[in-house]
Amino acid sequence: MLHARLQFLNNNYLHQSKPINSKVTAKREGTPHTHYTFAVRQYLKKMQLKLIASHILIFIISIFGITHLYEYVGNGTTEIIYAIFHLTIVLILYLVSGYLLTDKTEKFKFWNYYIIALIGAVIWLCAFLNSPTDLDWKNGNGGILWLIYRMYISGIETPFNFSDSFSIHTKNIKLEIIILLILTITPSILQAFGGFIKTNRNKKTLPNIGYK
């Protein structure tokens, strides 16, 4: 009886399906949402790099292009007019750069244009914490960070450096520090506005297709 029982258990075991221990590797396919998120991140990364590149290009145009013509401009009213013209051109360039670098098919998001303001704000904060009462780096009071910051925003600040009547430099250090912070935020705001114009314009030009 015992022998018959053992034989039955042995036969039952032999007929059971055994798991396959081999490892099968396959390429994991992402969901459409995963692919979309990756594409958006890649787009934003490229866009941030292009925004920084545009900032550098505008700096070059402002410093080595437009500024060079000041030597041909007289003092007084003419110099002020040219400084205003200089500033206007720089502001328009930031606006146009935001327009050109925006994909018209993308949904407008203001925070996509933060990079120039973010970098500038970080440098500004470090400079302020290091030297909150002295902006003159020549004094050796730790104001070297203010020099780095002024170089970063020099493309938009330079028009204010040629005429005392059109200048941001005041005896009130706190006010001047706030103005310097505004100058690093302005480019991002203008680029965002340029992007908004492009996306909004694209929405208006899309054909209205109706279904009967």
Image (cartoon, rainbow, N blue to C red):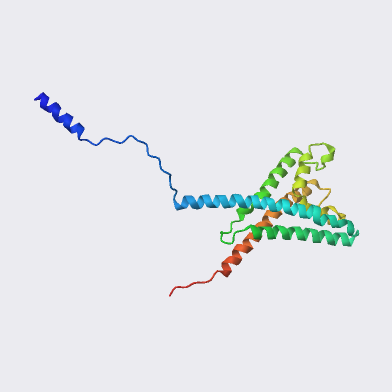
| Residue 158 percent across, percent down from the top left | 80, 52
Q: Quadrant of residue 162?
A: bottom right
- 81 over 49 or under it: above or below: below
x 73%, y 58%: residue? 91
| Residue 58 percent across, percent down from the top left | 74, 54
Q: Is residue 182 visible?
A: no
x 69%, y 51%: residue? 53
Q: Which residue ends up furthest to the top in the rendered image?
A: 2
x 16%, y 31%: residue? 11
Q: Quadrant of residue 139?
A: top right
Q: Which residue ends up furthest to the left in the rendered image?
A: 1
Q: Which residue ends up furthest to the bottom in the rendered image?
A: 212
- For the image, the number of numbered tags is 0
Q: Quadrant of residue 12?
A: top left
State the residue in front, 91 or 25: 25
- 205 over 179 or under it: above or below: below
| Residue 172 percent across, percent down from the top left | 81, 48
| Residue 184 percent across, percent down from the top left | 72, 50
Left or right of 28 in this view: 111: right
Left or right of 150 in this view: 41: left
x 62%, y 63%: residue? 198
Q: Is residue 116 visible?
A: yes
- 74 over 48 or under it: above or below: below
Which quarter of the rendering shows the N terminus? top left
Which quarter of the rendering shows the C terminus? bottom left
